[in-house]
Image: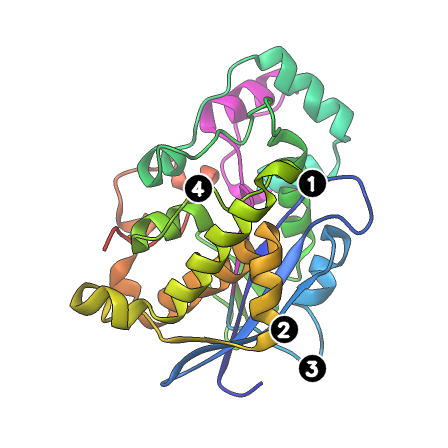
Amino acid sequence: MSGVLVAGIDFSGAKTVPNDTWIAAGSLTNMGLEVDEIRKVGSHKVAAELTKPDICYSAVGIDVPFSLPSEFLAFMSEKLGKPEFQSWQEVAEQLVFMSFEQFLELVVEFKKEPKRVCDKAISKAAQSPLHRGNPSMVQMTYQGIRLLATLDPKRCAVLPFQDRVKNGTAILEVYPRQTLTSLGLPDSGYKSKDKKDKDAAHAVRRSIVENLVQIRERKGISHKDCPRLSIGPAARSAAMDSDHALDALVACYTIAMWHTAKQLFDDPLDLDHVEVLTEGWIYSPKVL
């Protein structure tokens, strides 16, 4: 690939190996975003994907909560007999040395499922990272934070917690469903929960892909800052056949938008919410 390399990842916390974690990778030039690759990698290989010696992504968007609600963080520090967490790094390091069983025990004892500031600000549909219903967010959140903690800080910067690294990779939390909402595209009905929904969900995914490719032409001046998107045949088929692959594609496109049109995104550090320093932020474009 030539141009600026970007990627999007739809993260899964499932125990199967490989699980349904998908990556979409693309090249961003003044002509737009070209995506030729969407593939299933499994969450166990994400860190290796982000630190390949021969590839350096400028930015990567991952669909997984990067941190936890401040209310729960205060509860967790108290239960552990520790001072309140002052930084995300402290939170991440705590989870690295905590088993999932210990973490789940704290979540169950806490009982509540509060949303982070960013969950409430970005989308009504966003779930709390502590959501224990179906699907549960708890294991995915736990694994996602631990993954981020293992990334080499000389190569990767987890935003908004860390300063960007020169010639390194910015890692951002994204929410593909809200990106679709912001772009005026279908944001539901594309996930097939059982066989009877399969054909209908496939049709919605096809519509989303086709509209993304034609977003500037179909939406007009309101979407003039959106990068043009071209998708190779294999990647297009993958996005139509799997909702996980489609979410990875939309995550990648979100990062392309952030890279080329930052005015479409709120800067969390400009907002009057100190919670983002430990809770994090969902990088989602404003509704166009």
**Residues under numbered marks 3 and 4 in contact, where contact means CB atoms less than 8 Å apart:** no
Which sits in the foreground, 207 or 213? 207
Q: How far apart are marks 1 and 4 (CA)?
A: 21 Å
Query: Which residue range is magenta in the image?
Result: 60-89
Q: Name the residue under label 2.
A: 234
Q: Mark 1 points at which residue?
A: 13
The amino acid sitting under disc 2 is Ala
Q: Where is residue 24 in the image (x, y as percent from the top left)?
A: 58, 65
Which numbered disc, 2 or 1, marks the residue that appears first in the sequence? 1
Q: Mark 4 points at which residue?
A: 188
Which sits in the foreground, 253 or 207? 207
Which numbered disc, 4 or 2, marks the residue that appears first in the sequence? 4
Report crowding for label 3: few under 14, some 14 to 19, many 20 or more residues within 10 A (C-alpha): few
Report crowding for label 2: few under 14, some 14 to 19, many 20 or more residues within 10 A (C-alpha): few
Q: Mark 3 points at which residue?
A: 54
At 73% across and 39% down in the image, what residue appears?
Answer: 14
